Amino acid sequence: MDFMNRHFTATGLIIKNDSVLLHLHQKIHLWLPPGGHVEPNEDPIEAVKREILEETGYKVQIINTSNTNIKKFKNVISIIPPHTIFIEPINDIKEGFHEHIDMIYLCEIIGGELKDDSWRWFNKKEILNHINESYNQLSDIYLTDELIHLCIELFNISEGVT
């Protein structure tokens, strides 16, 4: 039986004023939210906060989109669960074909400043305008269908949160 090489990753969708922060990923030419690999000895919450700070300059807090209350026991703590988990196929020139197990969180800015202009705020209307154009490489805004639907879902949730 062949096993797929898998990497754990964490992604944060930052929603602010009915907009989501994305950047054009240079390697794969898609607009994506900040995120990256979970490092050894790091939990996914630490990973997504670190990745967002490194990539954008923003400090964030995680918004709990689940019905799970965080608990502390004698020797165990629970952490905020991701909003969703995607298993994403990745075809990397260096590492070859593998999958990312991507834990996706809704995040809110609590400090910092945007470090460069490679990031762009997409409002809800812009995202909705591309719902029928996912994976359209001829479009000036190249978004995947899963990102479009996830953004819409999180816009709806954040309207009651932020």
Image: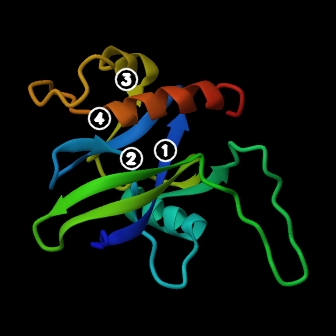
* Closer to us: 53 or 72: 72
Q: Is residue 150 above or below residue 2?
A: above
Q: CA distance from mark 4 to mark 3?
A: 11 Å
Residue 79, quarter of picture = bottom right
Per the model, the C-alpha gap separating discs 3 and 1 is 13 Å
Mark 1 and mark 2 in contact (Cβ < 8 Å)? Answer: yes
Classify residue 15 as left or right of residue 32. Answer: right
Q: State the separation of the CA atoms marked 2 and 3.
A: 13 Å
The residue carrying mark 1 is 13
**Amino acid under label 3?**
Ile
Which is nearer the N-term, disc 3 or disc 1? 1
Are dots 2 and 3 in contact, CB under 8 Å?
Answer: no
Q: CA distance from mark 2 to mark 1?
A: 6 Å
The residue that mark 2 highlights is 33
Distance from label 1 to label 4 (Cα)?
A: 14 Å
Tell me the number on the disc at residue 144.
Answer: 4
* Residue drawn at 63 percent across, 31 percent down: 158
- Say few, some or many: other residues with alpha carbon within 10 Å of mark 2 (under 14 / 14 to 19 / 20 or more): many
Q: Residues within 10 Å of mark 3 (few under 14, many from 20)?
A: some
Frontmost residue, 50 versus 47: 47
Residue topped by disc 3: 127
